[in-house]
Image (spheres, rainbow, N blue to C red):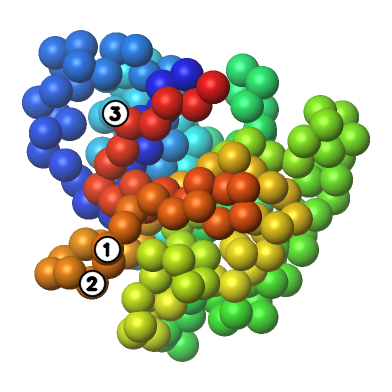
Amino acid sequence: MKILAVSDQVVERIYTLAPTGQFKDVELILGCGDLPYTYLEYIVTMLCTPLYYVPGNHDPEFNPNDTRSKAEGGFNVDLKTIIYKDLLIGGFGGSIRYRPDGVNQYTQSDAYLRAFRLLPTLLFNQIKHGKALDILISHSPPFGIHDDSDQAHQGLKALNWLIKVAKPKFLLHGHTHFYRNNIAESETMYQNTKVINVYPYKLIEVK
Ligand SMILES: [Zn+2]
């Protein structure tokens, strides 16, 4: 299955390529946060495929009654898991806390508490499907992988823990932008999980 994953930056090329059928074999769109919801809605409309996404630290706080806090036609999977064509997909939004009043920002301990809330669903998946997760989408990278040394771009340790517990085949994240030579890699194996920085977009083949 071909997946289009997007994050952090609007790519003008997608506006030009989507109407030409360039992504016609894409069966799923995954959003890793910090994108205008109008951009996500445009991609969903053009590709006519499901979108699952998590919010980033620049996205508004989720409010089910406020259409501006969600992407129409998509599903916010923050702290949820869903199944799509046998693929178990889970979500973990937000980043490390670097501003006291920032939304979708968590201290390392807050992030652990959020990750623990996923445990019952992961356990249920394991019993029902024989696996906890295939793909975990997050906004933040895990700690020490594709993260950066400044406070705002430190990865979340809870994601390293989730990888160990849920053993997804892929963790897709955003938040770390490439500039100068700050990050050497966008794909790293951690345990048995391929960690991919999708900034600003990636086409990923999943079996
Ligand atoms: Zn971010």
Q: Residue at x 31, y 58 (%)?
A: 185
| Residue 178 placement: quadrant | bottom left
Q: Which residue is mark 3?
A: 43
In front: mark 2 or mark 3? Answer: 2
Measured along the vertical axis of the image, is residue 10 above or below residue 34? above
> Mark 3 is on which residue type?
Ile
Helix or strand or loop: what does disc 2 sit on?
loop
Give residue 54's position: percent from left, percent from top.
Answer: 49, 49
Helix or strand or loop: what does disc 1 sit on?
loop
Work out whether residue 66 or residue 88 is closer to the camera in this orientation and state it: 88
Q: Residue at x 83, y 31 (%)?
A: 130
Mark 3 or mark 1, which has the lower sequence index?
3
Relative to 192, is 187 on the left or the right? left
Q: Residue at x 32, y 18 (%)?
A: 47
Give residue 179's position: percent from left, percent from top.
Answer: 16, 66
Determine the CA span between mark 3 and mark 1: 29 Å
Measured along the vertical axis of the image, is residue 184 above or below residue 30? below
Determine the CA span between mark 2 and mark 3: 29 Å
Q: Which residue is mark 2?
A: 182
Q: Which residue is mark 1?
A: 184
Does the rendering let one see residue 102? Answer: no
Helix or strand or loop: what does disc 3 sit on?
helix
Measured along the vertical axis of the image, is residue 189 above or below residue 27? below
| Residue 70 placement: quadrant | top left
Mark 2 or mark 3, which has the lower sequence index?
3
